Image (tube, grey):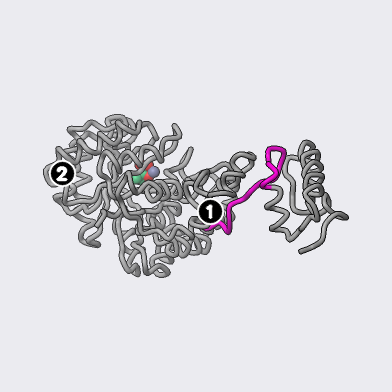
């Protein structure tokens, strides 16, 4: 059987860190229920110690979700971890996700701690977290910019203390795909107890590489968990897009050889829900969930798709929750697409000549109007057709 790729959704935690995307507790529970329907494996519900509101949201999601693990983020200190554990008490499968920065820059300038102090704090945090749950994730923040020797030391120690997932964060989206994949592979090879944990990728999109980096971490590095968000929501330029990474692994199963447990038909409903709640509009040309992702405008493409959809579709719109693909009628459309739309509208013209005349009128109109709608077609042919 193929290995499984664990889908860890952080829309409600890192996604909410998008400026302007904050959500109420009720909204978060609605999204969590949709994520459960989507069959994500882990839902990061929030950061329980960040505020009372976040604590209550994590608690409400822990109570509402049964089919996915529910996770809370916490810094690597006892107070945060205890708060996360308390918020997760009602969860069917609680996960505590603790993190601390490991890059020289973050340790010196932000934490003002020595590497030895960070090492000790990470180790003790995981030890303490293990008293509350068997499912502990540890993230070296800014991991991709950390010194490899130091990172190996920290990760080996936290696995020894019981961390079950190691999440190598590319916190500022600095990594390049091959480099990030190789970095994870190197860590897994060098750390003697590395196979006692699941390796995870967490990428930000500052250079537009979050999905590419995540896929390289999976393919080259052997990661088996990917952290992602609906509509790529997230801090600054966003996180790795769930819809893109899932459909890449699924569509190119021949390349990745991995299973994903997602019900992909719930992707578009999830995207719409998140967009509606946050007010973050999805760009029309966004892969998978953009309005144009399965729309064909060129006559050559339309003709191909009408003959065999695989000519210009590597996935089907229905597979990800759209009701159908879309043939957009406009100035680039050909006679075949026009004829097909007449037939879908139940319009029969009584001769080839009538069809040719209607098509000529259609082209004329299309030069003036970017998209021709069904009402336009009805108006174009009124008087010279019979309704079928
Ligand atoms: O980007 C990051 O480093 C994070 C960690 C908390 C995992 O979101
Ligand atoms: Zn992040």
Q: Residue at x 76, y 64 (%)?
A: 388
Q: Quadrant of the N terminus?
A: bottom left
- 134 part of magenta stretch: no
Q: What predominant SS class does the magenta segment belong to?
A: loop
Q: Residue at x 50, y 45 (%)?
A: 18
Mark 2 surroundings within 10 Å by alpha-carbon count, few (fewer than 14), some (14 through 19), many (20 or more) = many
Residue in the foreground of this view, choosing between 286 and 155: 286
Q: Quadrant of the rendered structure where residue 368 is?
A: top right
Q: Position of residue 237 (x, y in %)?
A: 48, 38
Residue under label 2 = 156
Residues in magenta, as a range? 321-337
Q: Position of residue 149 (x, y in %)?
A: 17, 32
Q: Position of residue 128 (x, y in %)?
A: 21, 56
Mark 1 near ligand 2 (CB under 8 Å)?
Answer: no
Secondary structure found at label 1? helix
Secondary structure found at label 2? helix
Q: Quadrant of the rendered structure where residue 144 is?
A: top left
- 334 part of magenta stretch: yes
- Please report whichever mark, 1 or 2, sits nearer to the chain's N-terminal start: 2
Answer left or right for 380 relative to 2. Answer: right
Query: Can residue 57 be seen?
Result: no
Q: Position of residue 240 (x, y in %)?
A: 42, 43
Indicate which disc residue 317 carries: 1
Q: Residue at x 35, y 70 (%)?
A: 90
């Amino acid at each position: 059987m193929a290995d499984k790729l664990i889908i860890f959704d952080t829309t409600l935690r890192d996604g909410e860190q998008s400026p302007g995307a904050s959500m109420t507790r009720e909204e978060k529970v609605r999204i969590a229920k949709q994520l459960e329907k989507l069959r994500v494996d882990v839902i990061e519900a929030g950061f329980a110690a960040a505020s009372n509101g976040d604590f209550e949201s994590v608690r409400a999601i822990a109570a509402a979700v049964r089919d996915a693990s529910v996770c809370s983020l916490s810094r690597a200190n006892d107070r945060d971890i205890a708060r996360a554990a308390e918020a997760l008490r009602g969860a069917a499968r609680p996960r505590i996700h603790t993190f601390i920065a490991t890059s020289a820059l973050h340790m010196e300038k932000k934490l003002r701690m020595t590497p030895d102090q960070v090492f000790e704090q990470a180790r003790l945090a995981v030890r303490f977290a293990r008293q509350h749950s068997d499912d502990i994730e540890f993230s070296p923040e800014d991991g991709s910019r950390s010194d490899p020797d130091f990172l190996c030391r920290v990760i080996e120690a936290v696995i020894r203390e019981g961390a079950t997932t190691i999440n190598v964060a590319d916190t500022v989206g600095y990594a390049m795909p091959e480099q990030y994949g190789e970095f994870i592979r190197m860590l897994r090879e060098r750390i003697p107890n590395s196979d006692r944990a699941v390796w995870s990728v967490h990428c930000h999109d500052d250079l537009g590489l979050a999905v590419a980096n995540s896929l390289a971490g999976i393919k080259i590095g052997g990661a088996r968990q990917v952290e992602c968000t609906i509509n790529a929501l997230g801090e600054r330029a966003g996180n790795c897009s769930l819809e893109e990474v899932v459909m890449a692994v699924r569509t190119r199963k021949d390349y990745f050889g991995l299973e994903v447990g997602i019900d992909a038909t719930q992707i578009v409903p999830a995207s719409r829900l998140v967009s509606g709640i946050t007010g973050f509009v999805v760009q029309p040309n966004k892969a998978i969930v953009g309005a144009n992702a399965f729309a064909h405008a060129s006559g050559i493409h339309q003709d191909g798709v009408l003959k065999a959809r695989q000519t210009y579709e590597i996935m089907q719109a229905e597979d990800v929750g759209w009701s159908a693909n879309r043939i957009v009628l406009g100035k680039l459309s050909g006679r075949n697409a026009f004829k097909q739309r007449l037939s879908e509208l139940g319009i029969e013209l009584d001769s080839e000549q009538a069809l040719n005349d209607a098509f000529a009128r259609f082209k004329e109109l299309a030069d003036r109007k970017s998209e021709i709608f069904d009402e336009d077609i009805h108006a174009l042919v009124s008087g010279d057709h019979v309704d079928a």
